[in-house]
Image (tube, rainbow, N blue to C red):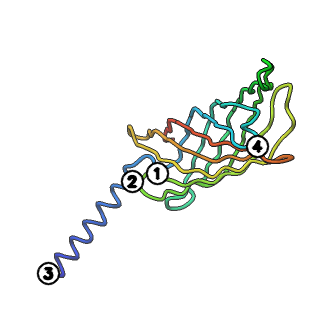
């Protein structure tokens, strides 16, 4: 009798855990997200350019249990810093980052993500396209049925004749499809 009750309790517990997983919009189905991006330049890149701001559109589709394909396109603009006390500033720079990668959910709503792609420079001072790589960590909080708030932090590097890198923060709203 004890084995039967233990077995029933185990099956009920597994059923509850599976049901909890399927109700969380951050873990299931394809979704699209729109977000605001903030960038804090580092190293040599930080010596000449200041804070960056932009936006991005993100698409996710499940490819395995707790693993999503992620595609992202955005726009980032960095303002130039003043050269010494001369009143002269470096010109602003902007780029269109195009990324693809994988998001792995480490726990219920916490994820690690890796992306690669291209950063396409725009404007008068553009100097072509750079290879882009961006490892990140984040969390998705469900706020409604098929809707979640997504906060992520990443290190992003753009490699072309050296590397320009920054710490990026993204706040987004994801919608289930």
Q: Residue at x 64, y 30 (%)?
A: 53
**Residue bearing mark 2:** 22
Q: Where is residue 171 in the image (x, y as percent from the top left)?
A: 52, 36
Are the two marked residues, 4 and 1, in contact with CB atoms closer than 8 angstroms?
A: no
Residue 1 vs residue 94, the one in the foreground: 94
The answer to whether mark 1 and mark 2 are in CB contact below 8 A is: yes
| Residue 94 in picture, x, y percent from top left | 75, 30
The mark closer to the camera, 4 or 1, is 4
> Where is mark 3, residue-wise?
2
Q: In this view, does 115 lie above or below 145?
A: below
Q: Could you tell which of marks 3 and 1 lies nearer the N-terminus? A: 3
Secondary structure of the residue carrying tag 4 is strand
Mark 3 and mark 2 residues within 8 Å of each other at the beta carbon: no
Image coords of residue 113 (percent x, y): 59, 53
Instruction: From the top left corner, tell me how far across and down residue 146 is, in percent.
Output: 43, 41
Quarter holding the N terminus? Answer: bottom left
Of marks 3 and 2, which one's residue comes earlier in the chain? Answer: 3
Upstream in the sequence, badge 1 or badge 2?
A: 2
Q: Residue at x 51, y 48 (%)?
A: 138
Dot in front, 2 or 4: 4
């Amino acid at each position: 009798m004890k084995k039967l009750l233990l077995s029933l309790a185990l099956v009920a517990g597994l059923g509850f855990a599976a049901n909890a997983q399927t109700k969380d919009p951050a873990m299931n189905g394809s979704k699209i997200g729109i977000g605001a991006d903030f960038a804090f330049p580092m190293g040599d890149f930080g010596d000449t350019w200041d804070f960056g701001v932009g936006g991005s559109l993100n698409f996710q589709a499940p490819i395995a249990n707790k693993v999503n394909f992620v595609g992202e396109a955005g726009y980032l603009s960095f303002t130039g810093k003043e050269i010494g006390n001369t009143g002269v500033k470096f010109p602003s720079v902007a780029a269109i980052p195009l990324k693809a990668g994988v998001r792995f959910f480490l726990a219920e709503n916490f994820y690690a993500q890796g992306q690669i792609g291209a950063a396409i420079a725009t404007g008068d001072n553009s100097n072509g396209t750079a290879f882009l790589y961006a490892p990140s960590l984040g969390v998705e909080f469900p706020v409604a049925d098929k809707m979640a708030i997504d906060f992520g932090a990443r290190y992003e590097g753009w490699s072309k004749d050296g590397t320009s890198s920054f710490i990026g923060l993204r706040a987004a709203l994801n919608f289930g499809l």
